[in-house]
Image: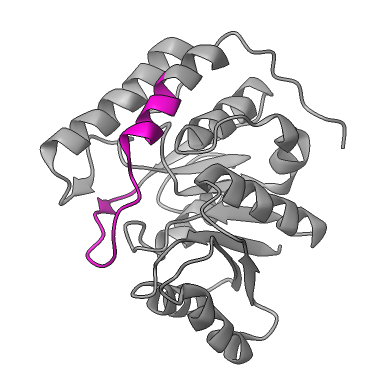
Amino acid sequence: MRKLVIIPTYNECENIAPMIGRVFSLPGEFDILVVDDGSPDGTAEIVRGLRGAHAGRLHLLERSGKLGLGSAYIAGFRWALERDYDWVFEMDADFSHNPDDLVRLYRTAIGGNGGDDGPGADVVIGSRYASGVNVVNWPLPRLLISWCASRYVRVVTGMPVKDATAGFVCYSRRVLETIDLDTVRMKGYGFQIEMKYSAWRLGFRVREVSIVFVDRTAGTSKMSSGIFGEALWGVLGLRFRKIEGRSR
């Protein structure tokens, strides 16, 4: 089973090399695709310098500017599908997601005991809210916004997911082949909601695995009020949108 971790970056020069090292130290041979949006701090140059030591496993997709989180992941999804990866992971570069949890997400996806018992899944979410609130070092206002946003998504859409805005996710190839990526509209963090909702509406099995989310200690957060605004209004439209899968 070929596994690819997509890591979108913009000015992550302090984090990207340690993150790559951690992912490649894990059992199970996870490959990495870094999607860099023209970072002026040299993030892409660092990745290029590491490719020789990880030939065939470390890949770089460079884009000309800040084109949005959602479009970065969609570009990564297309890249993964073209190269026949079986499982594709979303993950932040700043260590807010623990790389060790990639193994738990994968084991849960294939039906093994990755900390959660039960059958496998097509989408596995590394969830901050699956068992209480597992967030470290966030200021209270930001935590409340995040928790309330996920609650809002559950009420509006009916989707039984406690952390709809989570950015630590494992998708099966089947999900990414079935969702019509050309119709995904939201570009910021609303993209995370739209992808989960589309998979759920198309009948794929979605599971949450409890993780501990730790706020970044290096680099700068990319959150903004516009990101939350897009998610707020975009979710209202999701409830009334017809979700159709494309034939594979």
Residues shaded magenta: 211-232
Q: Nearer the viewer, residue 204 or 145?
A: 145
- Up the image or down, 81 lies above or below 55; here it is above
Apparent side of residue 81 relative to residue 21 in the rendered image (left or right): right
Residue 120: image quadrant is top right
Residue 159 visible at all: no
81 up-or-down from 116: above or below: below
Q: Residue at x 60, y 31 (%)?
A: 205
**Residue 179 place in picture, x, y as percent:** 72, 33
State the quadrant of the C terminus.
Answer: top right
Residue at 56%, 16% in the rendered image: 238
Q: How is the image coloured?
A: one colour
Residue at the bottom extreme of this rendering: 53
Q: Quadrant of the N terminus?
A: bottom right
Asked if residue 248 lies left or right of residue 9, the reply is right
Q: Is residue 114 magenta?
A: no
Q: What is the x, y in percent for residue 237?
A: 54, 13
The residue sitting at 65% across, 30% down in the picture is 204
Q: Which residue corresponds to the image point at 45% horizontal and 77% vertical from the top-left?
A: 42
